[in-house]
Image (tube, helix red, strand yellow):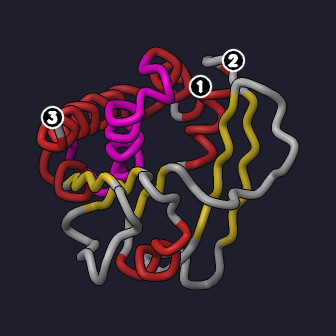
Amino acid sequence: MAVVMGETASLYDNKFVVQTQSYGPEARGGASKSELVIGDEEIDYPKVLEPDVFIALSRAAYLEYIHGLKENGVLIIDEDLVDIEGDLPKGVKLYKIPATRIADEEVGTKQATNVVMIGAFAAITGILSVEGIKKQIQNRWPRFVETNVKALELGMKAGEKAKAEQE
């Protein structure tokens, strides 16, 4: 997911990007992590010190990384997989997206969960352009453009709904 988001920002939105990731044997459902730094200026340090946005697609990842989220940050969770436990960092805006459910029931494949969440992220933050994401979908998955564009659009709709509920 972070790779697609970073490529979109770099190739189509004229941003500077650094992306790192760590995946252990627990990558499926465990606390794997990708970090993405997006900026308008050159990036001088490749690691995320305090994320502005945290997207949690598993309970394990949420529990492992929530305490690093910046005060007044944005937390986007897959509401069917992540239960909020304990206190959130001060001022955090929480957005609950049924990403896996949307992918499974409306797109027709759970494999589209990440693209649903990219759409939600774009709608909530405005950091990535929709046209850029669509171009990157065509570039990365030419055989599955229709499925992934549908997932993107449904994710954006869910993100817009979650954002409206926050305001």
**Vertical arrangement, residue 165 with respect to residue 59, above or below:** above
Indicate the amino acid at tag 1: Asn
Q: Pinpoint residue 27: horizontal percent, then vertical percent.
A: 55, 75
Pick whichever, 68 or 17, lies toward us. 68
Q: Which mark is residue 14?
A: 2
The residue lying at 36 percent from left, 47 percent from top is 117
The residue lying at 27 percent from left, 32 percent from top is 156
Q: Pinpoint residue 154: horizontal percent, then vertical percent.
A: 22, 35
Residue sitting farthest toward the right: 44
Q: Which residues are magenta?
A: 107-130
Magenta span dominant secondary structure: helix
Mark sitting earlier along the chain (3/2): 2
- Real-space Cα distance between discs 1 and 3? 31 Å
Where disc 2 sits, the SS reads loop
Pick whichever, 167 or 132, lies toward us. 167
Q: Which mark is residue 139?
A: 1
Q: Nearer the viewer, mark 1 or mark 3?
A: 3
Indicate the amino acid at tag 3: Ala
Residue that carries the numbered disc 3 in the rendered image: 164
